[in-house]
Amino acid sequence: MTDPAETTALITNDAVVIGMLAVILGAVFWASSLENKAVKRFFAIIPALLLCYFLPSLLTTFGIVDPEQSRLYFVASRYLLPAALVLLTLSADLPAIFKLGPKALIMFATGTIGVMIGGPVAILLTSIIAPDLLGSGPEAIWRGMATVAGSWTGGSANQTALYEIFGASSDVFSIWIAVDVIVANIWMACVLWIAANQQKVDRWLKADASAVEAVRDKAEAYELANARIPTLKDMMFILAVSFGAVGAAHAIADPLSSWFGETYPQLDRLSLNSSFFWLVLVATIIGVTLSFTPARKLQGPGAAKVGSVFIYILVACVGLNMNIAAILESPAYFLIGGVWMLVHVALMFTVARLIRAPSFFLGVGSMANIGGAASAPVAAAAFHPSLAPVGVLLAVLGYIVGTAAGWATGLMMAQIGG
């Protein structure tokens, strides 16, 4: 973490920053509820969730906040995300979700293949247009891009593994971390827009969204039939279940990741030494188990809504990591990353249209690769809170295949840019 004395940010107190984020979230929701035709037209184009994601990025872009110095994202991802996963999963109709069919897996696999193809295509174009950018030895950009391939097919644990495998220099690695974060976050913003306009996108894709709509409608019907004004006791129960599960997940995840790292280091490529991997997985398992118990009745007083609040806070904290001005510092590398992402996105839309997959599968299948466990549930919940478990399950799958897919991508790029 950056020393507060070294940062040039205007505000370094996280208490102040979280207050600013809360005000931004409140202001967005207040504005979106106004009965004004111009306002309604605006939010029809720019959804509230996208603003909750984009506006915090301006705090970083204009130097008000330094996300590297702030601990808010760490707190949100390690405490609020697993709590949200528990609350959204215990409220979900898991049997109905598992009946969604194979299209979710097809789109996830398409996302992985898109990353594996996009990297070599981007570096091939670079070798033709600007060969001076390729570099050599530890400074070769394909080494840094290989780490991004691990991140975009799995997560940060996979990215770190590939950093060690391919031996990128620290300078190259730091540049491509910035490209990873900015380009992935821009695409995340697009996915949130798709979620807010899913009916329009589904019509364009000629998609059969009936299965997704059935899960969503069933969840809404259950919530409506069991909804009641929450009492203080209800809210305390929701708090106890969510953060009790978070505590249990941490208690299991930390020693389990250490044990795998010490006992079976050869399994590190599957992210089994990552405490975050186990945290997400254990929290999801707890939520799934609770969905078959009387704890599911907590949906009535608003468990899913509390989980959604946690998701929105996480979205705002993720937004802090997007410094749009960073693109101006190394535009060529961001352009390469943008071409890479465009190949991935183009393939996702092509396959989705061919198999008539709903926009939900497109967005979540992509973010399970590009964003991993911190973003896929957020993307899924943006389509509907009851669908968050799909994002979790696909993200966990991404952790498993991420290192192998990233390694294969790195080898292909080495043949072109080495």
Image (cartoon, helix red, strand yellow):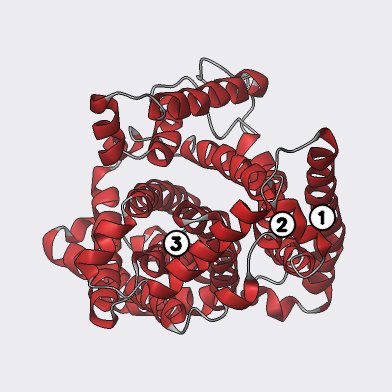
Q: Residue at x 40, y 69 (%)?
A: 361
Q: In this view of the protein, which residue sits in the foreground, 175 or 76?
A: 76
What amino acid is at disc 1? Ala
Q: How far apart in space, not on screen, are marks 2 and 1 (Cα)?
A: 7 Å
Decide if residue 385 is on the left or right side of residue 53: right
Decide if residue 385 is on the left or right side of residue 116: right
User: Which residue in the protein does label 1 denote?
Assistant: 245
Which circle marks residue 382 in the picture?
A: none
Q: Residue at x 43, y 40 (%)?
A: 49
Q: Residue furthest bottom?
A: 102
Q: Is residue 35 above or below residue 86?
A: above
User: Which residue in the protein does label 2 denote?
Assistant: 86
**Pointer 2 and pointer 3: residues touching (CB < 8 Å)?**
no
Q: Residue at x 50, y 19 (%)?
A: 8
Identify the mark nearer the N-term, 1 or 3.
Answer: 1
Q: In this view of the protein, which residue sits in the foreground, 233 or 136?
A: 233
Identify the mark nearer the N-term, 2 or 3.
Answer: 2
What amino acid is at disc 2? Val
Give the quadrant of residue 314: top right
What amino acid is at disc 3? Met
Q: Is residue 79 above or below residue 150?
A: above
Percent position of residue 372, x then y: 53, 61
User: Which residue in the protein does label 3 denote?
Assistant: 367
Query: Which dot, 1 or 3, sits closer to the camera?
Result: 1
Query: Which dot, 2 or 3, sits closer to the camera?
Result: 2
Identify the mark nearer the N-term, 2 or 1.
Answer: 2
**Pointer 2 and pointer 1: residues touching (CB < 8 Å)?**
yes
Identify the image quadrant of the C terminus.
Answer: bottom left
Q: How far apart in space, not on screen, are marks 1 and 3 (Cα)?
A: 25 Å
